Image (cartoon, rainbow, N blue to C red):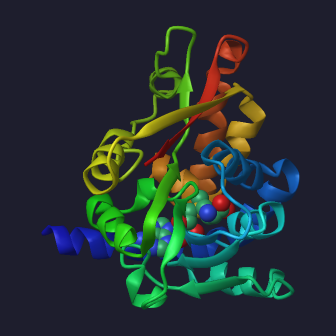
Amino acid sequence: MGSSDFSRKVKQNVSSNFDQSLTIYQDFEDKYHFFAEFTAKMAEWIGIRPGASILDLGCGNGISSRVLCEGFGCRVLGIDLSPKMVEAGQRMLSDLEDVRLMVGDAEFPGELAGEERFDYALYNASIFVFPDANQALREAAKCLKEGGEIAFSFYPAILGPNDEDLMDEAFRRSGFTPPKFRVITTYEAACGALEEHKGPVGHYRWVQPLDVGFLKDFFSIPAQSASLFPGLDYEERRERVRRLFDSIADLAEKGSVVWRMARA
Ligand SMILES: C[S@@+](CC[C@H](N)C(=O)[O-])C[C@H]1O[C@@H](n2cnc3c(N)ncnc32)[C@H](O)[C@@H]1O
């Protein structure tokens, strides 16, 4: 498959997986307030200024955009591939004048942003499914004002006390075949691209205790379960997610979930 075929296929899958995720995604958020907290951690870490203008790339149904607007006093343009996530976000955020959400490919933010220039381009839990992070970050950098910054938060690393990968251990114990790749773009590749387009990269790790119930719920979001068990129907994926994380329940007290972030 050529790289443009691969890219098209990934984006079609992302769009349809997130279209199908809307209800469960929002139920998960209502229960844990996770994506809102993740956004706030990134915004606090990079010290976002009130009144700043932000591109929220992979905005989903606007959870991150709402936090940036209501919690940090920013103006936000959110872009997402999933029409259903965006429509829901437009409804839920219709009272916020400073938030605009649009359907589009955030690898090319300039197509929707036009001549507008922003203080920040942020990716909350989205860059790892972009097929060409280098292109995405190059295009995002073009949409920034002089001195503007880019930051992203990443897919979880589930680690044991010596930083060993407990997801690998869970696949070993449960006997399921691990996916060829859990993410489309690795943290290292995204950081390399960020450095190329914006200069030296800073890193931050938000560490949470390993909570098997949380992980089962997180990976039961249809789009997240597809990252572990691609090609299976949703009910089968959800059942496998349950068994996968039950297999490491005895390691919960020793493990942690690490959410990495990068900025430049
Ligand atoms: C885990 S959700 C995060 C949503 C939101 N940022 C939040 O904090 O709730 C990831 C989102 O990235 C979007 N996405 C992935 N690749 C994209 C692309 N190339 N262009 C636009 N959106 C993309 C998906 O459709 C999905 O809604």
Picture quarter with ligand 1: bottom right
Please identify the quadrant where the N terminus is shown: bottom left
Residue 180 visible in this rendered orientation of the protein: no
On screen, residue 133 versus residue 117, left or right, reads: left
Q: Residue 49 falls in which quadrant of the image?
A: bottom right
Q: Is residue 167 above or below residue 28?
A: above
Which residue occupies the foreground of this view, 41 or 1?
41
| Residue 102 is at least partly visible in this image | yes
Residue at image position (34%, 51%) is 194
Q: Position of residue 106 (x, y in %)?
A: 44, 75
> Whole-percent x and y of residue 20?
62, 73
User: Residue 205 location in percent, x, y?
Assistant: 57, 31
Q: How many marks?
A: 0
**Residue placed most toward the observer, 116 or 224:** 116
Task: Name the residue: 48% across, 35% down.
Answer: 203
Q: Residue at x 47, y 22 (%)?
A: 165
Residue 28 occupies quadrant = bottom right
Q: Is residue 73 left or right of residue 193?
A: right
Placement of 256 over or under 64, stated as above or below: above
Percent x, y of residue 212: 72, 30
Residue located at (42% from left, 67% from top)? 146
Q: Residue furthest left?
A: 2
Q: Is residue 197 above or below residue 179?
A: below
